Image (cartoon, rainbow, N blue to C red):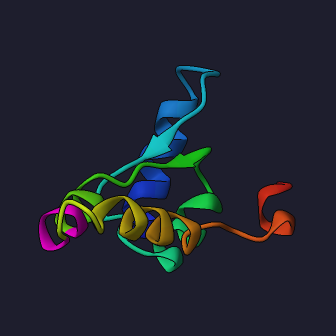
Amino acid sequence: MTAEAASLVARIRRWTQLPVAVGFGISNAEHVAQVAEFADAAAIGSAIVELIEKSTPEAAPGAVARFIKGLHLPEAALAR
């Protein structure tokens, strides 16, 4: 995924100066770290939807919050 996504982001950057996000196949902190090497953002949708579906209505907000906190990159990785 990474090589193809990086190539696509490079092609997109030739046509725009807007931030570029990658959002296919992103489901854990390792994916986010890989995408951070070449894109401005990682969009996570399906993994959060799946987590909500597996959680009770009462537990879902906390489960999603913990999941998102687990995706954060160290500040050094953000300063590129």
| Left or right of 27 in this view: 9 | right
Furthest residue in direction front, as rendered: 58
How far from the left and from the top, in percent, is residue 48? Answer: 29, 60
Residue 65 vertical placement versus 54 (above, below) = above
**Rendering coords of residue 80 (x, y %):** 82, 54
In the rendered view, tell whether residue 4 sits above or below residue 8.
below
In the displayed structure, 37 sits above or below 21; it is below
Relative placement, left or right, of 77 versus 13 is: right
- Identify the magenta region: 51-55
**Which residue is drawn at the image coordinates 19% and 71% (left, top)?**
55
Which residue lies at the image location 55% right of the left edge and 75% below the top edge?
A: 70
Query: 9 and 39: which one is in front?
Result: 39
Instruction: Tell which residue pokes out farthest to the bottom in this image.
Output: 30
Q: Is residue 27 left or right of residue 6?
A: left
Residue 62 location, quadrant: bottom left
Q: Residue drawn at (57%, 32%), measured in percent from left and top?
A: 13
Estimate the x, y position of residue 69 in percent, counting from the top left: 58, 68
Q: How many marks?
A: 0
Q: Quadrant of residue 57?
A: bottom left
* 2 shown above or below 43: below
Q: Viewer-proximal residue, 76 or 20?
A: 76
The quarter of the rendered structure image containing the N terminus is bottom left
| Residue 61, magenta (yes or no) | no
Residue at 52% from the left image edge and 66% from the top image edge: 32
Magenta segment's dominant SS is: helix
